[in-house]
Image (cartoon, rainbow, N blue to C red):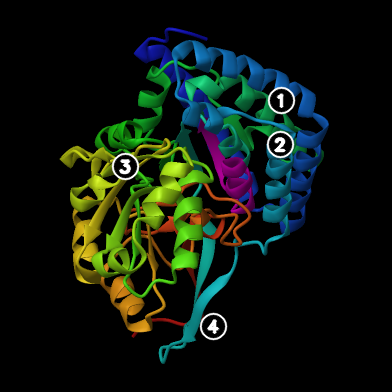
Amino acid sequence: MKDLTQTDAEALIAKLGANAREAASVLAEATAERKHAALIGAADAIIASESAILDANAQDMRFAEEKGLSPAMLDRLSLDPSRIRAMADGLRSVAEQADPVGRVLAEWDRPNGLHIQRVATPLGVIGVIYESRPNVTADAAALALKSGNAVILRGGSESLHSSEAIHQALVSGLRQANLPETAIQLVPTRDREAVAAMLRAQGLIDVIIPRGGKGLVGLVQSEARVPVFAHLEGICHVYADRDADPDKARRVVLNAKTRRTGICGAAECLLIDREFFAKHGPVLVQDLLDAGVEVRADGELSQIAGTIPAEPSDFGQEFLDKIIAAKLVDGVGEAIDHIRRYGSGHTESILTENDATAERFFKGLDSAILMRNASTQFADGGEFGMGAEIGIATGKMHARGPVGAEQLTSFKYIVTGDGTIRS
C-alpha cells in the first residue's frame, strides 16, 4: 500500500481503530491466564519463525543500506538469532509478571458508609509510532496485551518487512489463546499519511507513544490530537566526579558510550571534574579514543591528541553514533547546571564514592532516570525487571521512565454501599 491520500489514510486508521476498540472491550475482561497463554504462544511462534523473520530483516537491511543509513542505525535495525531469542525471552518475561489489571491501588472506608477502592484498569487503545528497531513490535505488543490494551503499531519504514513477520507470530499467540487477532494490529504501509491519521484519531486511539528521534517525537507532540507519552531524545550524560573510583569510571564510561551507540541510553556527553582530571589524567578520554570513538572535546580536553575541538552545537546533541562530547567542569554544581541546560530529561549517571555528592546530584536533577556508578545503557525496561518497555517517557505526567505494563494502566474508583444515600 503506497501513496495514500489523506482520505485513504483516515479510512485505514478508522478501520484499524474500530477493530482495536472492539478488541479492547474483550481484553478488558480477559483473564490473566489467557493473556499469559497468548504471550507464551507468541514467544514460541517467534522462535519457530526465526528463518522467516531473518529473511524479512534481510530485505529491510538492503532497503536501509540503499537509503544510506549510518552503521549505528543499521545496527538498530539488524536482527540475528540471538536478538530473536531475546525478543522471545522478553515476551516470556512479560508473561510471567503479575497481571497489572485489577490491582487495588488503595482502599478506604468513609464515615458516610461508603467503601472506596482505586483499581487499575487498561487505558484502552494505544497507538505506538516507532523507528527502525523491529524488536519494538514485540515489546510494545507484549506490554499492551499484558495490561489489557489493544495496540496499533506503526513501525519505521525501514523495518516494515521485519515488523510484519514478527506481527504474524504475535497474532498466532492471540489465536491460540482465543483472543481477538485485532488486539495487535500493524499499519501495513510506509506512507506517512498513516502517521498523520493516527495523530488525528480522536475517539479511536486513547494515547500515542512515539519512540524515535527528535523529529518524530516533535511531530507527534505538535500534531497529535490525542494524549502523548513523550519519549524524547536520549541526551544522556555521565559525570566523573572528583571522588570517582578511576577503575569503575573507566569501565562505566566506555560501556555507556560503546556497548551500543545507536540506542537512546547511550551516553552522548562526558563531564569530568577538574580535580579528577588533575589526579588521573586523560584516561577516560583516551579509553574512548582507543575504542574508536570520535571525542569532540571542549577547552583543555581538546589538547589531548586525537580529539576534535567541540562546537557549541555538540552539547545537547544526540549522536546515536561513535561520537561523544566531552568537557571539564568545576564540581558537581557545574555538572548539574550543564545537564539542566543541555539534557533531555532521559538518563544521567554520576561516578562517585561520595554519598553527599551523589545525593546532591540526585536532588539537583529531574531526569526520568538517575544513576550512580552504573552505565546509562541500563536505561531499559528489561534491565529494570519490567521484561520489556515501549520507551523511556521523559515527560512528567502519568508514565515516566521505562514504560512497562504497569505504566500502561490508568485507574477507576469502585464505590460500594449498602443502600447508602446522601443526606
* Label 1: few (<14), some (14–19) or many (≥20) C-alpha neighbours in 10 Å: many
Q: Earlier in the sequence, mark 2 or mark 3?
A: 2
Residue 28: x %, y % from top left: 61, 52
* Label 2: few (<14), some (14–19) or many (≥20) C-alpha neighbours in 10 Å: many
Q: Amino acid at mark 1?
A: Ile
Q: Earlier in the sequence, mark 1 or mark 2?
A: 1
Mark 4 vs mark 3: give the one in front: 3
Q: Which residue is mark 2?
A: 84
Mark 2 vs mark 3: give the one in front: 3
Q: Earlier in the sequence, mark 4 or mark 2?
A: 2
Does residue 412 appear in this view?
Answer: no
Between the residue at mark 2 and the residue at mark 3, the CA separation in whole angstroms equals 41 Å
Q: Give me the disc on residue 294.
A: none
Residue 367: x %, y % from top left: 33, 60
Q: Nearer the viewer, residue 352 or 99?
A: 352
Residue in the picture at 40% in, 68% down: 351
Asked if the residues shown at circle 1 and circle 2 are in contact, with their CB atoms under 8 angstroms apart, the answer is: yes
Q: Which region is colored magenta? A: 139-154
Q: Is residue 141 magenta?
A: yes
Q: Quadrant of the C terminus?
A: bottom left
Between the residue at mark 4 and the residue at mark 2, the CA separation in whole angstroms equals 54 Å
Is 248 situated above or below 28?
A: below
Between the residue at mark 4 and the residue at mark 3, the CA separation in whole angstroms equals 79 Å
Q: For the residue labelled by badge 4, is the local secondary structure a helix, a strand or a loop?
A: loop
Q: Is residue 299 left or right of residue 78?
A: left
Q: Which residue is mark 3?
A: 305
Q: Is residue 332 left or right of residue 88?
A: left
Q: Give me the disc on residue 53.
A: 1
Q: Give me the disc on residue 418.
A: 4
Is 288 situated above or below 368?
A: above
